[in-house]
Amino acid sequence: TQLLEQSPQFLSIQEGENLTVYCNSSSVFSSLQWYRQEPGEGPVLLVTVVTGGEVKKLKRLTFQFGDARKDSSLHITAAQPGDTGLYLCAGGSNYKLTFGKGTLLTVNP
Amino acid sequence: EPEVTQTPSHQVTQMGQEVILRCVPISNHLYFYWYRQILGQKVEFLVSFYNNEISEKSEIFDDQFSVERPDGSNFTLKIRSTKLEDSAMYFCASSGGTEIYGYTFGSGTRLTVV
């Protein structure tokens, strides 16, 4: 069974601070996807990383896929209240995604 | 921006009844999926569908569940005899390719079995 562990589970920070959340697994995935989910809504794709060591930037968000394709991180620079939400990582293999439980981020003004 | 549409947004059903959850995937996508999320828990894979057949299914997707693409636009999930533990948010998703492509999820159907 493939599992993805996300840490921390909860994170509360002040506006302007930087943060990093992590996604770790003992399994190798074809891809690692990051989503953001609002309460009562479906996950919204932020990025897909495919190559080991790959780094992608999306404005203030930086995503990294580990060299062994088992882990990933999401770094947010100068967090804003609008970044508040549940961040999910999902590993892709064999026509399916395995989701982590997510990191619930709160950015206080 | 293309989106995945799910109907209904909420459904309440009696235990033992059949329910059909409907989805309209993005028109040029080839891969279709159902996931569910029990309240407070993580998103779980149910089934993937490609070229008019199931590609992969989870242990949750037993013989009480079925999927169908009855026409060129709709993708449905049927639960034949609902149980209390089927209460969850059900998400449909589609993608243009395999899991190295990002998925587009719908807003979900909240199913409550009473």
Image (tube, rainbow, N blue to C red):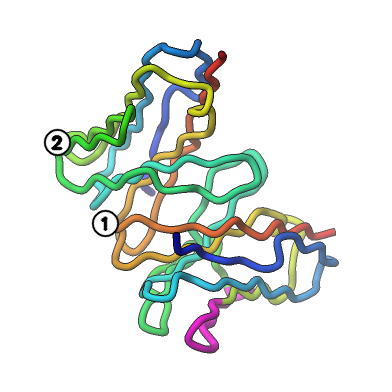
Check contact, mark 1 vs mark 2: CB within 8 A: no
Query: Eyeballing the image, is A9 above or below B62?
Result: above
**What residue lies at 36% left-to-right and 24% top-to-bottom?**
A76
Image-based side of B11 in relation to A54, left or right: right
Q: Give how far across and how far down residue B14 sits, in percent.
A: 85, 67
Secondary structure that dominates the magenta span: loop
**Closer to the camera, B88 or B80?**
B88
Q: Give how far across and how far down residue A103 sits, in percent.
A: 48, 29
Few, some or many residues within 10 Å of mark 2 (<14, 14–19, 20+)? some
Query: Eyeballing the image, is B39 above or below B63?
Result: above
Is residue A74 among what the camera can see? no
Q: Which residue is mark 2?
A: A53
Query: Eyeballing the image, is B83 above or below A9?
Result: below
**Closer to the camera, B10 or A68?**
B10
Q: Secondary structure at mark 2?
A: loop
Q: Which mark is residue B100?
A: 1
| Stretch in magenta | B63-75
- Kind of residue at disc 1: Ile
**What residue lies at 30% left-to-right and 56% top-to-bottom?**
A93
- Kind of residue at disc 2: Gly
Q: Give how far across and how far down residue A41 sits, in percent.
A: 60, 48
Dot 1: chain letter: B
Is B66 magenta? The answer is: yes
Query: Eyeballing the image, is A39 above or below B110?
Result: above
Toward the bottom, the furthest residue is B71
